[in-house]
Amino acid sequence: MRIVVLAGGTSTERDVSIVSGVGICNGLRAKGHKAVLIDVFCGINQVNWEDPFPEEYDVETAADYIRSFNKDIEMLKKERREFFGPNVLELCKKAEFVFLGLHGANGEDGRVQAAFDLMGIKYTGTGYLSSAMAMDKGVTKWMFQMYDVPVPGGTTMKRQERKDQLEEGLSFPVVVKTCCGGSSIGVYIVHDQKEYTEALDAAFSYEEEVVIEEYIQGTEYTVAVVDGVAYPVVQIVPCEGFYDYENKYKPGAVKETCPAPISEELTRRLQENAVKGYRALGLESYARLDFIVTEDEKIYCLEANTLPGMTPTSLIPQEAAVLGMDYPTLCEELIRVSEKKYQ
């Protein structure tokens, strides 16, 4: 199959996306597919249009080319009006499928998906509307509440509505986080008024809207849902601090155990709530839902990730491995379930 793996982009998760893209492209090529790695925003200036999906292909060279733009991304964002880079759409139209290795804004939020729907380009993951809803943590919280998926109490706040006093019903500690961020970028656990004010300043530097919610003390878990079926549960225990950006992508910074060392009853409840959250947002193909569980085993769903990480330390590959599925096979499986959108 001729496949474009899209990575990079303009979000705060650009670096992680490149690592995911390299893994996906290598995995698909190991399965015999003609996969090429392209930066969705920076594109590629020279393409051999006689053979754009060659048998021989150096993924690392393609990744180095993508990374060469890293220092210029902010400048390019100011100079350019168009999001898709040179030759990106042309290559995607020639591909049989596009594997979205993108994370965060302008990739995971439904905009690329909507554009591809209009152009007849097939892609991995859920559609544009469910992508947009899942990307917005405020909307996600509302949808989960409507479908009885347990969530922490909280509220949203727009920059122009900013109040430096906690909403009634909330008390310190609280979590302040960007509405549409990912990889725990822009997430702050605050314990007093001074920290709260500083957290609002920091969160609003990323986005125009933030979520403020009660801090739940407990253990983190995550569950992938693929084609409507829950995968094994992963338990996540950071060696120190919380499961932030640095801990997520630093080998050895967290202890991740799959299957989670918990009772069959708690496993069942986590998997049931993962599927319930998946359905509440109208998700298709695959997603990963994150939870926190208190000492007395109360479950709270934190968010849904519609294009979860595919790096060497990412969680879905760990869950798939427990099911006997290696990384290249998982990449093929995610394409297979995504093809169902088009049947």
Image (tube, helix red, strand yellow):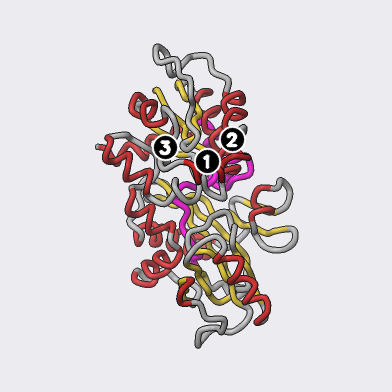
Q: Nearer the viewer, residue 161 or 222?
A: 161
Mark 1 element type: helix
Percent across and percent down for residue 205 are: 57, 63
Q: Position of residue 50 (x, y in %)?
A: 39, 11
**Vertical order, 271 against 94 (above or below):** below
Identify the residue at image location x=28%, y=36%.
119
Residue that numbered label 3 is attached to: 84
Q: Check the image and name the residue furthest to the bottom.
A: 168
Cα–Cα span, label 2 and label 1: 9 Å
Residue 307 falls left or right of residue 74? left
Residue 322 on image: x %, y %:
56, 43
Under mark 3, the amino acid is Phe
Q: Which residue is mark 1?
A: 76
Q: Nearer the viewer, residue 200 or 268?
A: 200
Amino acid of disc 2: Phe
> What's the residue at 59%, 35% (across, down)?
69
Q: Which residue is mark 2?
A: 69
**25, 179: nearer the viewer:** 179
- What SS does tag 2 mark? loop
Alpha-carbon span between mark 1 and mark 3: 12 Å
Callout 3 crowding tier (Cα within 10 Å): few <14, some 14–19, many ≥20: some
Going from N to C along the chain, the mark reached first, 3 or 2, is 2
Q: Residues within 10 Å of mark 2 (few under 14, many from 20)?
A: some
The residue shown at (49%, 42%) is 79
Q: In this orientation, does residue 190 appear?
A: yes
Q: Earlier in the sequence, mark 2 or mark 1?
A: 2
Question: Which is more foreground, mark 1 or mark 3?
Answer: 1
**Is residue 310 positioned above or below 65 on the image?**
below
Q: CA distance from mark 3 to mark 2?
A: 14 Å
Give the quadrant of the N terminus.
Answer: top left
Quarter containing the C terminus: top left
Magenta span of residues:
301-328
